[in-house]
């Protein structure tokens, strides 16, 4: 084994696939519909809330693009904050990000089962669908999916890219079928289809007063759908032509996914009354293919369910890559044991970092299964990522003063006034979203404190602070010049 030598083998397409696949999945096929349960009262305003969420996501993406062009290293967000602000802030923010993303990997793995259930129902395999809802299967099958894609990551970035890109193409193909179908049907068509299948008459939605409260709360939750482009920055140590490809891939990804989200959500709500979605979301886990399945023939339903399942599964390899590179970067700087910076000599992957992240995600699967509510994991991820994105905006502001040599390497938005305009706007909006998220979380009734994402986040910050203090004390005892170490980029 070697302790150095990540291989720069990910091209622009592979980087875009990493970002797209980390963003699409639960973000478009589940969250815009299950939000009716998590944010009661949002009703017909989901699309508007999505549009609001796009703005801070786009500004955050620009901040990432600037920093990635100057610091193309594995563990991007950790490296950015540690070299622009302080090693402590860089570590505790990225440690909470790692924990939140690991839990989110558990969420994605866990919600794969409802998609398989819908696929079984679409091909009239009711017994199989019922089998997939049984407790042990809901736990064991997600674990199997997680470790399958852990294997994809262990086999190297070339194998990873060759796996991800074709799956991304299939995902988009099925998604465009779903969009076309959604705009082809009306609420009246859906009501007739429900009556035919279930013998139930559903009321068509009436006009309701607009309420800013649920819309703002919903926009924070829907912001989580745009989390994923940061995975491109985490792969900075393996990108070809990183100064060009990293910011370009981030911009392509956020633009493509943002447009896709809005079109997809609009299509489903065009066909399915929001009142029906809100009512059913209270008692069952809904998916976009399951809803459109009322309107489409079995063959087409199978196609869009299969595409949605691929979309959800695609989240896993990209997210595993992202979190494992954070662990690798910490270990390279000495904040984690050196073992986690070890590179497999054959596949050129940080195998111990990948395995540790997958173990953490497995804990997330068990937690989702025990709580019975995957939105707890999403809330934790949103809290962690909002803080992390806020720090990225502050990093853009602080970098020229903290580390002018690195700042001079920024190749995206080189105009300093433009950089400041973007970063200040992003920091203000992200701070506001963070406050909304925290207030919503702590004011929600819960059976125990750990069901509040914010309190769990504080515990994670505490754990991260203890790890940092211990490792820094150990490095100082060894006579390591920490100021010099964190003034330059790690060698990868």
Image (cartoon, rainbow, N blue to C red):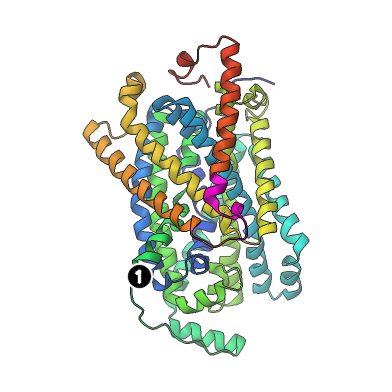
Quarter where residue 341 is shown: top right
Where residue 1 appears, x then y in whole percent?
Answer: 70, 21
Quarter where residue 86 is shown: top left
**Does 455 appear in magenta?**
yes
Where residue 103 appears, x then y in whole percent?
Answer: 60, 48
Instruction: Report crowding for label 1: few under 14, some 14 to 19, many 20 or more residues within 10 A (C-alpha).
Output: few
Could you say whether the residue bearing mark 1 is in a helix, strand or loop? loop
Q: Range of the magenta residues?
A: 447-457
The residue carrying mark 1 is 211
Q: Work out which residue is located at the far left of the displayed protein and give it.
A: 417
Residue 66 showing in the rendered view: no
Q: Nearer the viewer, residue 446 or 283?
A: 446
Dominant secondary-structure state across the stretch colored magenta: helix
Where residue 263 appears, x then y in whole percent?
Answer: 40, 64
For image coordinates 31% across by 45% down, the residue present is: 428
Residue 35 showing in the rendered view: yes
Where residue 203 appears, x then y in whole percent?
Answer: 47, 87
């Amino acid at each position: 084994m070697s302790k150095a030598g990540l291989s720069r083998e990910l091209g622009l397409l592979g980087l875009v696939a990493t970002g797209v696949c980390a963003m699409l999945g639960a973000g478009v096929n589940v969250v815009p519909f299950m939000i009716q349960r998590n944010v009661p009262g949002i009703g017909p305003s989901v699309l508007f809330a999505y549009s609001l969420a796009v703005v801070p996501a786009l500004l955050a993406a620009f901040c990432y693009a600037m920093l990635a062009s100057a610091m193309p290293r594995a563990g991007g967000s950790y490296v950015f904050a540690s070299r622009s602000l302080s090693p402590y802030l860089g570590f505790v923010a990225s440690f909470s990000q790692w924990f939140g993303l690991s839990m989110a990997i558990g969420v994605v793995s866990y919600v794969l089962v409802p998609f398989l259930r819908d696929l079984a129902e679409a091909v009239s395999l009711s017994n199989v669908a019922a089998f997939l809802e049984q407790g042990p299967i809901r736990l064991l099958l997600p674990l199997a999916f997680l470790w399958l894609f852990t294997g994809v990551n262990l086999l190297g970035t070339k194998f990873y890219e060759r796996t991800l890109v074709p799956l991304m193409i299939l995902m988009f193909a099925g998604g465009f079928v779903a969009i076309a179908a959604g705009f082809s049907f009306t609420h009246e068509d859906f009501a007739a289809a429900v009556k035919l299948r279930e013998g139930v008459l559903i009321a068509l939605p009436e006009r309701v007063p607009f309420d800013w409260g649920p819309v703002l709360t919903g926009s924070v939750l829907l912001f989580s759908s745009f989390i994923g482009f940061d995975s491109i920055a985490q792969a900075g140590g393996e990108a070809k032509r990183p100064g060009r490809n990293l910011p370009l891939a981030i911009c392509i990804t956020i633009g493509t996914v943002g447009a896709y989200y809005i079109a997809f959500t609009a299509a489903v709500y065009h066909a399915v009354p929001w009142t029906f979605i809100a009512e059913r979301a209270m008692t069952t886990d809904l998916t976009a293919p399951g809803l459109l399945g009322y309107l489409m023939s079995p063959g087409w339903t199978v196609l869009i369910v299969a595409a949605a399942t691929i979309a959800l599964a695609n989240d896993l390899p990209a997210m595993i890559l992202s979190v494992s590179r954070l662990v690798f970067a910490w270990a390279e700087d000495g904040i984690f044991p050196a073992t986690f910076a070890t590179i497999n000599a054959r596949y050129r992957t940080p195998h111990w970092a990948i395995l540790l992240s997958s173990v953490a995600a497995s804990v997330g699967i068990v937690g989702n299964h025990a709580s019975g509510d995957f939105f707890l994991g999403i809330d934790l991820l949103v809290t962690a990522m909002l803080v992390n994105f806020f720090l990225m905006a502050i990093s853009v502001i602080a970098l020229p003063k903290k580390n002018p040599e690195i700042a001079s390497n920024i190749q995206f938005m080189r105009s300093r006034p433009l950089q400041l305009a973007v970063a200040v706007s992003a920091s203000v909006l992200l701070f506001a979203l963070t406050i909304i998220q925290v207030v919503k979380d702590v004011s929600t009734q819960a059976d125990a404190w750990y069901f509040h994402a914010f309190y769990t986040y504080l515990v994670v910050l505490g754990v991260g602070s203890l790890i940092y203090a211990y490792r820094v004390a150990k490095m100082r005892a060894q006579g390591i010049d920490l100021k010099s170490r964190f003034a330059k980029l790690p060698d990868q």
